[in-house]
Image: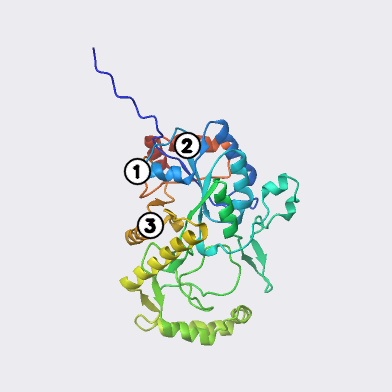
Amino acid sequence: MSASRPAAPSGLKSLPVLMYHYVSRRKNSIAVHPDTFEDHCRAMRRAGWTGIGLAEAEAHLLGEAPLPPRSALITFDDGFLDNYVYAWPILKQYGHKGVIFAVAGRLEQGTPRPTLDDVRSGRIREDALPRVDAPYVRHELGFDERKDLFCNWDEARLMEADSTMAVAAHSHWHHAVFARPEFKGFHAPGHRTRTFDRVDFPVPWGLPAFPQRPALLRCAFVPDPQLVAAIRTLVPQDKAGAYAFFQDSGRVRELEALVELFAAKPDGLGAYESDADRTARMTRELSDCSATLARELGHPVRSLCWPWGAYCDEARDIARAQGFSVFFATTMGPNPPGSAAHVHRFKAKDKPGSWLLLRLFLYSRPWLARLYAKMRL
């Protein structure tokens, strides 16, 4: 009589992790319409998929406990208010859970605002919801500025209290740094299309627009203090005054001439930060994030989603020293048990539930997830 084969493990082989940003009626390459998000949640429920809680996902990713088949983790980056207004009620409706990776410094104090639940119950009209579908605000100087609304801490605690939505880390400020001394144009008041376009440096109006890179990825180029001081003297630093300055071609030529004088000298525009300064900057960003989340939520947080999915070995080591042990990225691929060091995710698109179900199938099977991720690169 031949020996019997060992039983195949029944747990999930690979955890599909969905990546959402906006759940909004405004078109955006990283936005999903609330009706589409509801279609996603409905399709998952009908097909037997469950959006699990963050603690369950962490246990799988750390190799501590198995997950049942057809488990998925639904994630939202940044902490936009539409996650509370639209996504939270829809998740509750279909019995799913999720996690918001919040930019801790963007969450402020405040009282809970109305949600889709209030509209559906008849307590308010839909036009009384916060302006989550209208992120652009007209400035008095005549241009539009992107002014996204973020959840506040009361709302974060409320979502965690019913166990539907966990809140985890997405850094403290989601900053970039200057990458190198070459530049094109200057920092001037005007139309802003991006929410996270801030640099980990006090940028005056008139500073050369040096290229930017994620702050936790690399060493920063730091503008020369004398250059910064000279620009502050030449260019008005109130927004209206700076705007008027850049409408005057003669004044702009003065600025160009000033910068050219500094650029003609070795390291005249600035220099790269030291190793010690880089370590201190990254430590500050991650420690502030960890401490703020623990203080406001009342518990430590061990999951960190890298801003723009970008990090270096030093940033990872610093994050671990701050208590983080599960790290989410933006690359696609499988997530078998024990893959907490680099959790793959796939972008949820504004497409029907059938589109999502196919990807859940693919990313729940390690070999298919690897093959599909390679094909998509």
Q: Position of residue 65 (x, y in %)?
A: 38, 39
Which numbered circle lies on residue 323?
3
Tag 1: amino acid: Gly
The foreground one among 374 and 229 is 229
- Amino acid carrying label 3: it is Gly
Q: Which mark is residue 338?
A: 1
| The furthest residue to the top | 1
What is the secondary structure assignment of the residue under circle 1? loop
**What separation in Å lies between label 2 and label 3 (alpha carbons)?**
26 Å
Q: Earlier in the sequence, mark 2 or mark 3?
A: 2
The quadrant in which residue 129 appears is: bottom right
How packed mark 1 is, by other alpha carbons closer than 10 Å (few <14, some 14-19, many 20 or more), is: some
Q: Is residue 71 left or right of residue 323?
A: right
**Separation of disc 1 and disc 3 at Cα?**
17 Å
Q: Secondary structure at mark 3?
A: loop
Element type at mark 2: strand
- In the rendered image, is residue 37 in sight? no
